[in-house]
Image: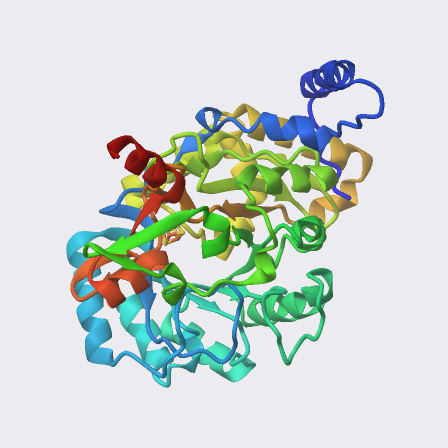
Amino acid sequence: MDNEQPSIARKMLISMNLANEKEQAGPGHETTIADIAVRELTPREYYRLPWSLTDNGISWLEVTDACNLTCEGCYRPHQDNHKSLEKIAEELKVFKQHRKSDCMSLAGGDPLVHPEIVEIVRMVREGGWKPVINTNGLALGPRLLAKLKQAGAAGFTFHIDTTQTRTDSKSDTEKGHNELRTKFARMVAAEGGMLCSFNQTVGIDTLEQVKDTVLWAQKHPDIVHTVVFILFRSPSLGGDFDYYANGDKVSIESNYDDSAWGGNSLLHAKDIVAKIREVDPAFAPSAYLSGTVDPDTTKWLIAARIANKLRGFGYVGPKFMEYVQHVHHLFRGTWLSYSTPKLTASGRSTTAIFSLLDPSVRAIGKRYLRSLWGDLKSIRNALHLQTFTIIQPADMMADGRVNMCDGCPDMTVHEGQLYWSCRLEEIKRYGCFVHAVPRRNKQQSQATVS
Ligand code: SF4
């Protein structure tokens, strides 16, 4: 387990709250630290990322619908529809015209099944973006990896989890897939110079297993740069609605497959935070994106820790996030999304510089110096910046509005326009977004009319 610990003030607050809780709840009620921690999730204390429709950290280029795997919750039907290089060039032109971004996520389908993926990576890099390949990894071997790096790939985000039935990892637990995750992280590290991230979908039935992935990642801060937990969404978890497109009633299941994988209740970002705090009580988010409808939701919630391979020294604060974003924008003209491996491995200089600006980083610096006092040899272990992100995708509000990510990083191009990639199927099928009408309210209003 990590050695990061909550501050004394925070410990006091937690134990006072625990005492109050127990008193109010009466005998037999066990309140955990995670219960309290979850109520401390207050977005206004974090740095609101300045990402917008036109100036963002990331953009999302889908190069194919085809995939060599089936994942529960995937919102794209798999047709063998590889985009031509001409079409990709057109879409890049649309991005260039409407939106600045640091990174270009190459997605699909699985982009590695596109026969011209190396050339696509080259086009994206020459266009001025950092190409990050979102893949299940099945088609990736050392030779293709070397070619992708040579073409300019900045990194990989591997989607590996229990929503998949994989041939290269037979486990039905998240922990069981850690061996495969380590294999990919080592493969990318051996090639060098590229970032390595992992995506994991989380439903109520796998919530408990988030801890296993966190503990695994924390052992490898040198080669696992980011872990992203994406909350599972499916139509049946959305609520009781009728759906309309172009004035006609439609079936939402024809756009998005329903699946029992997500269990019977919805997860929110705070549930993941509480779960992570069970194994790492110091876990502290510092930046977020809010919702388009509900300002209190954290649609993207980001926490970044500084650690060496032996232990963690703490999480950076909102000021760190703010400075990093603004310095990058000032000198590079874009908001930062994925940092380079060189930057993630420069934890010592980062800590020294940002100690002056961010009290959380100052505390990290002190903890680090104290650790050296007891074990000077550990100075040989580099300090790394490792990020954890929690994504809470589209949420249905009770009144039928959809709470999207405000400043969506995953906007994609379709027929010359920018769209949320998670709802593109609606546009493809109907030419418009589907609107939800709550069934109960409709009955009430009909009753009022009659
Ligand atoms: S709005 Fe949809 S596409 Fe955009 S980041 Fe959120 S979940 Fe992803």
Vertical arrangement, residue 74 with respect to residue 307, above or below: below
Residue 396: which quarter of the image?
A: top left
Left or right: residue 371 versus residue 138 is right
Residue farthest right in this picture: 28
Vertical arrangement, residue 200 with respect to residue 8, above or below: below
Residue, x 77% and y 40% (percent of image)? 376
Residue 246 or residue 298, whichever sits in front: 246
| Residue 237: x %, y % from top left | 50, 50
- Quarter of the image where the C terminus is located: top left
Q: How many numbered marks does the figure carry? A: 0
Residue, x 43% and y 52% (percent of image)? 338
- In this view of the protein, can residue 328 be seen by the observer? yes
- In this view of the protein, can residue 129 be seen by the observer? no
Left or right: residue 294 versus residue 286 is left
Residue 129: which quarter of the image?
A: bottom left
| Residue 149: x %, y % from top left | 44, 73
Vertical arrangement, residue 133 with respect to residue 366, above or below: below
| Residue 437: x %, y % from top left | 32, 45
Residue 81 or residue 73, whichever sits in front: 73
- Quarter of the image where the N terminus is located: top right
Residue, x 44% and y 49% (percent of image)? 393
Residue farthest front in this picture: 450
| Residue 219: x %, y % from top left | 71, 53
Left or right: residue 442 versus residue 270 is left
Residue 449 or residue 328, whichever sits in front: 449
Q: How is the image coloured?
A: rainbow
